[in-house]
Amino acid sequence: MGKSTLFNLLTGLNQHVGNWSGKTVERREGYFELNGRTTCLVDLPGTYSLTANSPEEVIAREFILREKPSMVIAMISAANLERSLYLVAELAALNVPLVVALNMIDVAAQEGIQVNVDALAQALGLPVIPMTASKAIGVRELLAVVEKSLDRQIFSNAQKPEVRSDHREVLSELERLIASHVPQPYPVDWVALKLLEGDAEMLRVMETNLPKPVWDAVYAVTCAHDDAFLAVASGRYEWIGQIIRSAVAHPKVGQVGLTDRIDRWAAHPVWGLVILALILGLVFWLTFTVGSPLQELMDTYLIAPLAGLAGQALSSAPVWVQGMIVDGLIGGVGSVLTFLPILVIFFAAFALIEDVGYMARAAYVMDNLMHHMGLHGKSFLPLFLGFGCNVPAIMGTRVIDSWPARLLTILIAPLVPCTARMAVVAFIAPVFFGASAVWVSWGLILLSMFALVSSGVLLNRIIFKGQRSAFIMEMPLYHIPNFRTVGLLVWQRSLAFVKKAGTAILGMALLVWVLSYLPNGDLNSSLLATFGQSIEPIGRLMGFDWRLTVALITSFPAKENAIATLGVLFGNSPDAGLADALAATFSTPSALSFLVVTMLFIPCMATVAVTKQETNSWRWALLSVLLLLGLSFLAGAVVYHLAVLLGM
Amino acid sequence: MKLLAEIRSGGTHEIGALAAKLGTTPALVSAMLELLSSRGYLQPYQSCVSGCEGCGLKGDCKTSGEADGMRLWQVSA
């Protein structure tokens, strides 16, 4: 607000810093010369109101009331006038000589906010001095007004806000009850107002000062109007609103105007959804058009030759060492690392969307849609905010008060499409669907959202019983993205992915390789094949052979393991990468079914762990796994057979 | 307070839309929300306060309710 800046400007080194008596709040006091008059200046704690909600507020008002300063300078921000004027409304009620220092006038002007200082002074009934304390602009004028006020050459006639009309009689009744019992230095009308507001400190003071029958009457009035704070605040905001209307012109053009214009479409209940769908489509298009060719290049010109080189270099090493390095390490982790270009583009696109301020609009329009479909906001909004990772989505359910509702929301939270699942989609979709991969990916997200919403609507009907939740969102202004911030986000997320590839994915790839090698080095008679073939009948329902079934199961520790496992199982040859091998082995219906099952499959290990942590029960974590297992298998089987029927 | 009545009618409200409904400025609605929040009528939404330690994305995930310059409140029970 610039209060300390002004204090330092005026007092320089001639100041003392200590603590307010009995408090840990800093007290600063200093002296300056005002036309030969030594003047004491006290820097009161910064606050936006004078109700006893914090020690700072109590200190500020007690000082003004007890020390009776010759003048109070209210240092307020022109850039945040609506909030600052609440303090002026409270100060005006204290009947003290008051001058308003309207600071940050330059910042307000930059934001396009034009304050008519004369109109503001007239509306407030107080002297108002425009200032820019950081540049010492307006200080001289402020001191001149202070001096005139001290010399009684200027008289202020503060316009005070009134309590909302339905509580004015109650206020009068309180004033009448306490009139002859209010201790010094408190003004009667101010005490009555504070009692009406339910100010804890004033209630305590008056309880000790009022005769018992009077206190009982006062207490009865305050209890009967325990929501009177809203009436007092309403009166103040009505007053602030009038002042703002008469003295402030908000920008019609520029950033705010641009945000409003864009939001007419982007936050529109229908067009907002169309724009969201287009943006998602654009992100996928960009990912597949730029990322997938890069991924193929990495696969063909980096991973496959690397596997070849490693094979040659290890030609004299034992076969199992060759297999572990070439198939396990390079085939598994290498395949996953080829995701990096896809993910970098994916992360960059989303970081850009977030940084320009669009993500809040996406949440808003989606929530609007879900609301119309009967989904409880508390079930959906936190989940959407956790978009990208299921762990925060589950934590987001903490907002739900009812335990059954929260539990069921936790159970559906893994249906939020996470980045790792999208990475698997981004790898597989172009292999099988080419130019249509954008539509397939888009459809898969819709499928996840459909599953989420259907479960949520059911949840709302059964558990929330149609109650309406309430959220308030403050959306940021659109702004030109900061490419450093976007770059940093992409770097952090990419680094997190590479770390995951070097730990969880590496571990699983090596385990898969070991199981695919033992007992005799032949994949088809390996432990993994035996296990895979034993569960293959389930996979067959969805069009999977044992390798796809195993790949799906190994995605439990981390979703990307599905690709790492396929990388190990299909190995790497200098001629063809994993993508070509997959395209040559599996049919389109099988691939589509695999993508559908991946989107709806049991969540990753971290998500199951957090489900256990949040529900404090393995039973619920297991139920979550079983539910999603059933749902994904059912959806996969339906999609596979439909695709076969349609001749895909 | 009309604002509180409007919020309690349910659904997700955006500050600009609330301001338009109440015939005031978004800044004034923000100020009112701050006050209602300080008095316990509303509470700022924060979900990821204790569970994100160790998560590589905790610095930039959206669940703090303040990331991306967006703020979110819910009505207190």
Image (cartoon, rainbow, N blue to C red):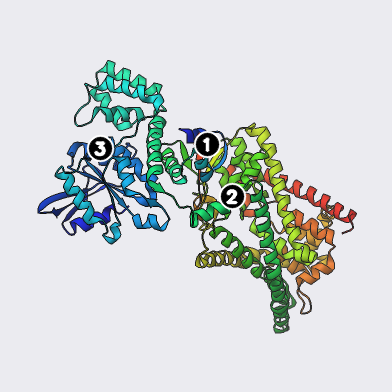
Q: Is residue A262 left or right of residue A173?
A: right
Chain under numbered label 2: A
Q: In the rendered image of this protein, does residue A515 appear above or below residue A237? A: below
Q: Which mark is residue A264?
A: 2
Q: Is residue A435 left or right of residue B23?
A: right
Circle 3 sits in a helix, a strand or a loop, which is it?
A: loop
Q: Residue at point 80% right, 65% down?
A: A432
How much space separates mark 2 and mark 3, taking CA atoms?
43 Å
Chain under numbered label 3: A
How much space separates mark 1 and mark 3, taking CA atoms?
36 Å
* First in sequence: mark 2 vs mark 3: 3
Q: In the rendered image of this protein, does residue A96 appear above or below residue A337? A: above
Q: In which quadrant of the rendered view does residue A643 lie?
A: bottom right
How much space separates mark 1 and mark 2, taking CA atoms?
21 Å
Residue A533 spot, x, y in % from top left: 83, 58
Amino acid on which the number 3 mark rests in the picture? Asn
Of residue A609 and residue A227, the one placed in the foreground of this image is A227
Q: Residue at point 84% right, 67% down?
A: A585
Residue A198 spot, x, y in % from top left: 35, 29
Callout 2 and callout 3 share a chain: yes
Q: Given this view, does label 2 or label 3 mark the residue nearer the observer? A: 3
Neighbour tally class for label 2: few under 14, some 14-19, many 20 plus, Cα within 10 Å:
few
Of residue A128 and residue A295, the one placed in the foreground of this image is A128
Amino acid on which the number 2 mark rests in the picture? Arg
What residue did someone put label 1 on?
B7
The C terminus of chain A sits in image quarter: bottom right
What residue did someone put label 3 on?
A157
Callout 1 and callout 3 share a chain: no
